[in-house]
Amino acid sequence: MEKQWRTIYQRGISHTYYIIESGELYEKDYQLYMLEENKITGLLPLQLRGVEGKIHFLYEINRKVSLKNVYEKESLNGEQMKSLIRKIIEVIKLCKEYLLDENKIMLDPESIFVQGGEYCFCYYPLEKQHFCEAFHRLTEFFVERMDYEDKEGIYLAYRLHRVTMEENYCMAELLEQLEEKTELKEEERFLREKKEEAETREEELWEQKSGYGEIDVAPQTQLIREDVSSYFRRKKRKKEKWGDWKLFYH
């Protein structure tokens, strides 16, 4: 979709703005009133300014850097990608609470800003791209910028990109499946490491036994079992959720 606007940066003594210069007419409506009257976590503060018959949307970005600039030279890993997606889910829920349209949340990397690991988005009332289409384009960025040493992150990025190419895909089901897959791999890796640790310890104990008499390896095995049980109790208690996207897409 061809953009109907251009963007610039304006830096002053106390404020820095990311500005969208629109070529369209826009009359102040409830969306802007809602943004002006409420500080919505995850959305950048917005002001309107008329310049030579055009409407400029000014987003305050003090000390924030765009996603595009952050990962221009760095690689993106799986945890960073999941953190961004969780923030998108959170912002969508808040938009619903304030009667704002989630399709107006801009998801191009140039318009997503980050500071100290916290992501902020531009709410652009004239945005015409559907959210699912915008999210698919964001997955293209994930694939291009992924750290190829992070195999689980690569799997997640390519899976997201491939599935979002399908017509009428369900975001909620997709993210739930990917989260379950990631957690399963983490558990398999943990169990493998514990098994290797137990085998190594038993070998050491048998070597001691051959030289110094009988040594009971049962307590060591019990410790490994308790460690594994503790891990799964902790996973069950602290399991993270992507969020219920079924509220937004059916």
Image: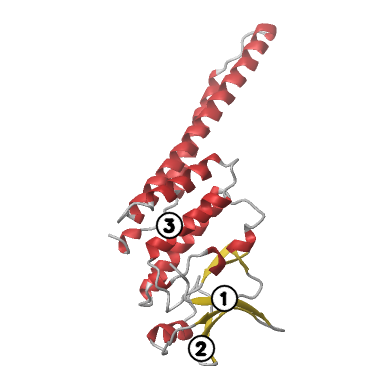
> Which amino acid type corresponds to the residue marked 2 in the rendered image?
Lys
98 is higher (above) or lower (below) than 213: below
Label 1, label 2: how many angstroms apart (C-alpha)?
13 Å
Residue at 61 percent across and 13 percent down: it is 215
Q: Residues within 10 Å of mark 3 (few under 14, many from 20)?
A: some
**In contact (CB < 8 Å): disc 3 and disc 2:** no
When the figure is inspected, residue 153 is found, relative to residue 188, above or below; the finding is below
Q: Which residue is mark 1?
A: 7
Left or right of 34 on screen, residue 52: right
Q: Which mark is residue 54?
A: 2
What amino acid type should be assigned to the residue bearing mark 1? Thr
In primary-sequence order, the first of circles 1 and 2 is 1
Q: Position of residue 107 (x, y in %)?
A: 48, 65
Residue of label 3: 136
Q: CA distance from mark 1 to mark 3?
A: 22 Å
- In this view, 135 is above or below 143: below
Q: Is residue 171 left or right of residue 85?
A: left
* Residue at x 61% of width, y 77% of height: 8
Q: Quadrant of the C terminus?
A: bottom left
Instruction: From the viewer's side, name the closer residue of 121 and 194.
Output: 121
Secondary structure beneath dot 3 equals helix
